[in-house]
Image (cartoon, grey):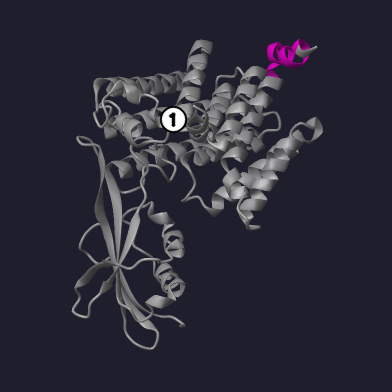
Amino acid sequence: MLYTVTMVPLLQRHSYTASMQLALWVAMVSIVFQQFDDFMMPHFTLNFLTIAGMGVAVVMYWIPTLRYLSVAAFMAALAVSFGKDWYAAANHTWLAVWTLVPVVLFARWWEEEWYLHYIRLTLGVVMIAAALQKIIAGTYFDGSYIAWMNNYGSTTETMFSFLCAPGEVCGWYALLGATSVIWQFVVGLFLLAGWKNLYILTVEVAFLLTVGLFADEMNFQVLNIALLCMAFRFGMPHWLAYICLVFLGLDLIGISDLVATYL
Amino acid sequence: MNYLVADWKRYVLFALLTVHTLWIAHHIYLATRDGVNPWKMGGYAMYVEPKRGVAVDVHMLNSDGTVQDELIRNIDLYDLYQGNLNFNVYCKPVTEKSLIRFVEDNEFLEYTDVRLELFAYRFAANPLRTDPYLIGITDIRWLSDGRFAYEVKMCGDEVDREGVVTVEL
């Protein structure tokens, strides 16, 4: 019985449509979780209303007849929330707005070649740009930023501090930094070229989850994972959605705080 | 013609992708010249270096124009930040409206001449550190009857904005 309840949904094969719709839902949930702190503010502000609206929309999403309406309502709330504080918004909120808001143009977006190309190319440009910024700054190839986080970061950001002496910028940090940048560049190239590769996506998902744990910022990584699942057109399997939801829940508490408390 | 109308959504997507890409390129240009906060404004340079914010120090100005070393503390800077895009665009001159709000938010500074010093931080290795550097100065000098004059210098010694404002006190 327990096996049936827990394992069967994880192992089930789902249609292309269902898994793509699940990916969009997880992306929407990651945005709600990211803005949860604003929701907990004691004031009945516009932010409160927009986040509450997004929360209602992600629940409505599970009613098939209301699905398009819920997506439209969610994107309207996201656009309003972003428009109010665009200059203070995190870069991943910008990414969510650029990639997800246009989904309202298409009732059956998962069948719309141009929208799927749009997400893929947008993510490709963003990955290449993010890698370029790191190369120009030089802080990854010399390992200095990884060293900074391992010396002055939160609990999880110091997870590689055993590699080098305190305060030192050693070769291991440079190796970690360079590997991250090169990998980001490779994923960007795959996206721009439209090479659909399950192995690349699998490694990238593992990479993003690790980075999410390291930086204690899981909502951004979950958004990326969901968008990549859409861009590569594999959709999101249930088991990956469960993992993402668990990590979003942990992120709400604060992974660094949990590690510091229990480990 | 019908084909063009039917495909308007595709043109919207193409336009969005183009604008987004151009903005990212512009952000890279600005970020490499310390013109914008790498973590903000939609440029994807977060985690390139430690989180950057701009700090605002407030000092009292003497009548001879010299600045007192001691910081004035417990200042409400919320509206000053909000009125200047949180200082995420480093060389954008401080706005007149935000200075009025700053004065209104900090009534205890009425008729006190002050200098606002804006600092950003630059990341450096060997040893690992973040060095503050001055990005702007704004002087507020009170005249009389609720009027003050202000002078804003950002990213250099040239005056970027100046004026005289009357506030209701």
Q: Which of B5/A135 is in front?
A: A135
Point 33% across, 68% down: residue: B72
User: Does residue B166 appear in the picture of this structure?
Assistant: yes
Q: Which of B50/A19 is in front?
A: B50
Q: Quadrant of residue A84?
A: bottom right
Where is residue A148 drawn, in percent x and y?
31, 34
Q: Is residue A167 left or right of residue A79?
A: left
The chain under label 1 reads A
What amino acid is found at the position of numbered circle 1 in the picture? Answer: Thr
Q: Which residue is mark 1?
A: A156
Where is residue B8 drawn, in percent x and y?
61, 37
Q: Is residue A187 left or right of residue A51?
A: left
Q: Secondary structure at mark 1?
A: helix
Q: Which of B132/A198 is in front?
A: B132
Segment tinted magenta in the rendering: A3-17
Where is residue A164 drawn, in percent x and y?
28, 23
Q: Is residue B113 magenta?
A: no
